[in-house]
Amino acid sequence: MAGFVQQVIEGLGTGAIYAGLALALVLIYRFTGIVNFAQGELAMFSTFIAWQFVHAGVPFWAALALTLAISFAGGMLIERVLIRPVEGAPELTLVIVTLGLFLLVNAAAGWIWSFLIKDFPSPFPGGALRAGGVALGYSTLGVLGVVAAVMGLLYLLFRYTRIGLAMRAVASNPESARLSGIGVSRMLALGWGLAALVGAVSGVLVAPVLFLEPNMMGGVLIYAFAAATLGGFDSPVGAVAGGLIVGVAETLAGAYVHAIGSDLKVGVPLAVIIIVLLFRPQGLFGHAAVERA
């Protein structure tokens, strides 16, 4: 029993990282209706910026604050320069733009920092709390705490601030929001900025666990898509819940399903995506689209 609980705890820690990137995907989709295939690469680039600050001698938390500010501004700039000119274009055009952004950011990171693997410091101490044969690592607690804090801050922003209410109005009905005097373009840029910021947090959390190099977020993005699909692409709460569920499912499958093992765990998120799309396309917490005939 202790072994099973240990696997669940490890799955929650991993799932929290997936949840962070899934939350960034959901934020952009809610505000613009775009599935951003470059979200993982933007998170990776932000992580390299944080590494550069730390490598230059800046304390970790100060480096993180600077990185989040730069990521926020960068997300808004991307929306203004690349996304706004194709606003209202066919979905295929938007997909191509985000895929082009994926390639551009990946190549830029490799050109600036090279494709060699780099060490990234963990913001959390080593060691673990032990009870009943179960070890609860401080890093796992830290990751869960950070994701919970991000989720709580976003809830407060959207629920109790004027900017948050305006962003919710734009996400619900852009045309009505524009007629009400809300600057829709400004709110969309803020949405991209917030998504870039949340993605940066995800990248900083995953880098100490995996490695730091331009392709590090490729696998994580697959799990994040599975989490967003499972929870619902229009539900931030669903993104977090989906990330935790996918993380636990992946860990348990790798530990107890011998046909899967550690080598085929990537099949778990793909199976989740297929099953959800077949039986509940809107996800567990999403809302089905209703159109008048």
Image (tube, grey):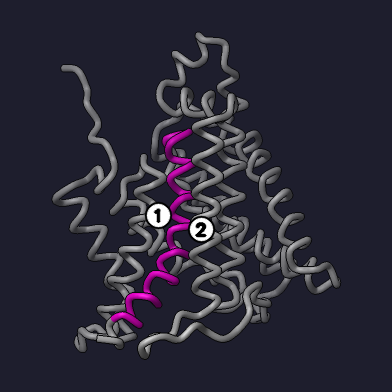
- Callout 2 crowding tier (Cα within 10 Å): few <14, some 14–19, many ≥20: many
Left or right: where does residue 146 sit relative to residue 118? left
The total number of labels drawn is 2
- Callout 1 crowding tier (Cα within 10 Å): few <14, some 14–19, many ≥20: many
In the picture, residue 201 is in which quadrant?
A: bottom right
Residue 59 percent coordinates (x, y): 80, 68
In the picture, residue 16 is in which quadrant?
A: bottom left
Magenta stretch, main secondary structure, is: helix
Three-letter amino acid code at the position of disc 2: Val
In the picture, residue 166 is in which quadrant?
A: top right
* Residue 244 within the magenta-colored segment of the rendering: no
- Of residues 166 and 229, the one nearer the viewer is 166
Tell me the residue that label 1 is attached to. 240
Residue 94 percent coordinates (x, y): 46, 39
In the picture shown, does residue 66 fall above or below 136? above
* Residue 31 within the magenta-colored segment of the rendering: yes
Three-letter amino acid code at the position of disc 1: Val
Tell whether label 2 touches label 1 (CB within 8 Å).
Answer: yes
